[in-house]
Image (cartoon, rainbow, N blue to C red):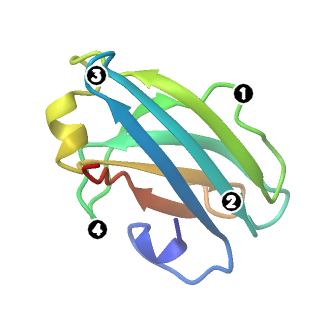
């Protein structure tokens, strides 16, 4: 996750990573987000957005409940049922969703990372 992946891109020292896996049998996405260097008073929200390829902005599909707010670094993990309505397996596997973290300084998103799952 970086500011260069935001649309439009910009320069920030904030960064992050997403470690995610998807279980096709249970339709469950499991994820862990690690972030640091969020500007100002820290994170104000975090979401999954879609449909949006790299360089394309998209609407919020899922807000992360209990995301650590007003901190500049931390971790957050959870699971999400891929319901086939709001978020579909087809588009998840095609990499058409992204996660981002918002801040006061960058309300549209300070860092973004495309949700790309590799086959294992």
Label 2 and label 4: CA atoms lie apart by 21 Å
Marking on residue 25: none
Residue for badge 1? 66
Residue for badge 3? 86
- Where disc 4 sits, the SS reads loop
Between marks 2 and 4 in the image, the one whose residue lies nearer the viewer:
2
Q: Residue at x 14, y 34 (%)?
A: 90
From this viewpoint, which residue is outermost toward the front?
Answer: 120
Q: Residue at x 23, y 58 (%)?
A: 53
How crowded is the residue under tag 2: few (<14 C-alpha within 10 Å), some, or many (20+)?
many
- Can residue 109 be seen here? The reply is no
How crowded is the residue under tag 4: few (<14 C-alpha within 10 Å), some, or many (20+)?
few
Compare marks 4 and 3 and give the one earlier in the sequence: 4
C-beta proximity under 8 Å, tags 2 and 4: no
- Where disc 1 sits, the SS reads loop
Q: Tell which of 32 and 16 is nearer to you.
A: 32
- From the top left corner, tell me how far across and down residue 115 is, in percent: 36, 51
Between marks 2 and 3 in the image, the one whose residue lies nearer the viewer:
2
C-beta proximity under 8 Å, tags 1 and 2: no
C-beta proximity under 8 Å, tags 2 and 3: no
- Where disc 2 sits, the SS reads strand
Judge left or right: residue 56 versus residue 109.
left
Compare marks 2 and 3 and give the one earlier in the sequence: 2
Compare marks 1 and 2 and give the one earlier in the sequence: 2
Label 1 and label 3: CA atoms lie apart by 20 Å
Marking on residue 35: 2
How crowded is the residue under tag 1: few (<14 C-alpha within 10 Å), some, or many (20+)?
few
């Amino acid at each position: 996750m970086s500011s260069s992946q935001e649309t439009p891109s910009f320069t920030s020292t904030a960064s992050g990573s997403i470690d995610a896996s998807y279980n096709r049998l249970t339709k469950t996405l499991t994820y862990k987000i690690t972030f640091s260097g969020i500007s100002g008073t820290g994170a104000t929200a975090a979401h999954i957005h879609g449909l949006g390829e790299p360089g394309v902005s998209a609407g919020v599909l899922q807000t992360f409940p209990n995301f650590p707010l007003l901190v500049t670094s931390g971790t957050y993990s959870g699971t999400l049922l891929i319901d086939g309505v709001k978020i579909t397996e087809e588009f998840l596997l095609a990499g058409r969703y992204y996660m981002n973290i918002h801040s006061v300084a960058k309300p549209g998103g300070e860092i973004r990372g495309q949700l790309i799952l590799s086959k294992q």
